[in-house]
């Protein structure tokens, strides 16, 4: 579902960020508790993602236990990035549905991601403006503090 590149024992996702140590393909069967440890998500959240359709089909062992693969970890990494953008869960679920539907949904996926990108850029601009206000206030108090200190020293 995401593009990955393996370099040695570390894997990079489509964003180019290094991920945790992974098992080699074919031996990449992780339990839900291992995935929770690797991702920082709770087992409850992982089950919820699966229930609402945010996670693709998760393989099961012969006893019915979930067995996640590297591709599932890649997907969870992308979902985490989408969460950080502020994308609503309904949109993330829609994106997951589009991915499962196949290549003919590229245009709709493109539009969804482009819209999210525009929202992120607006938030960044808002945060930069807020940072400027904070910087001005910090400079004011730094200058005022120095002036008070020199008055007391006189």
Image (spheres, rainbow, N blue to C red):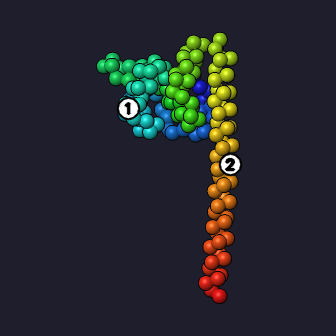
Residue 122 in percent (x, y) is at: 67, 38
Q: Observer-nearest residue: 57 or 105? A: 105
* Rendered-image quadrant of the C terminus: bottom right
Name, please, the residue furthest toward the bottom.
154
- Kindly report the distance in space between the C-alpha atoms of the residues bearing marks 1 and 2: 38 Å
- Where residue 37 sits, quadrant-wise, is top left
SS type, badge 2: helix
Of the image marks 1 and 2, the number of the one nearer the N terminus: 1
| Quadrant showing the N terminus | top right
Q: Position of residue 87 (x, y in %)?
A: 57, 30
The label on residue 129 is 2
Disc marking residue 43: 1
As helix, strand or loop, the secondary structure at mark 1 comes to: helix
* Residue 81 makes an appearance in the image: no
85 versus 149 height, above or below? above
Instruction: State the image coordinates of residue 90 (x, y, percent, origin top left).
Output: 52, 23
Residue 146 placement (x, y as % from top left): 65, 75
Q: Is residue 152 visible?
A: yes
Q: On screen, 150 above or below 23? A: below
Q: Nearer the viewer, residue 55 or 114?
A: 114
Residue 116 numbered mark, or none:
none
- The residue at 63%/78% (across/down) is 148
Q: Residues within 10 Å of mark 1 (few under 14, many from 20)?
A: some
Q: For residue 113, which quarter of the picture?
A: top right
Q: Seen in the image, is 27 located left or right of residue 13?
A: left
Mark 1 or 2: the one toward you: 2
Q: Toward which corner of the image does residue 30 lie, by quadrant?
A: top left
User: Residue at (66%, 55%) from the top-left corner?
Assistant: 133
């Amino acid at each position: 579902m995401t593009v990955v590149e393996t370099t040695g024992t570390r894997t990079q996702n489509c964003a180019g960020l290094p991920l945790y140590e992974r098992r080699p393909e074919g031996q990449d069967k992780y339990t839900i508790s291992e995935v929770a440890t690797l991702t920082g998500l709770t087992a409850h959240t992982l089950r919820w993602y699966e229930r609402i359709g945010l996670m693709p089909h998760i393989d099961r062992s012969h006893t019915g236990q979930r067995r996640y693969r590297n591709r599932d970890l890649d997907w969870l990494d992308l979902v985490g990035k989408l969460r950080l953008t502020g994308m609503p869960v309904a949109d993330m679920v829609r994106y997951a549905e589009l991915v499962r539907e196949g290549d003919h949904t590229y245009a709709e996926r493109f539009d969804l991601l482009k819209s999210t990108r525009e929202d992120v850029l607006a938030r960044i601009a808002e945060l930069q403006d807020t940072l400027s206000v904070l910087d001005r206030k910090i400079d004011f108090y730094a200058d005022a503090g120095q002036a008070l200190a020199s008055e007391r020293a006189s």
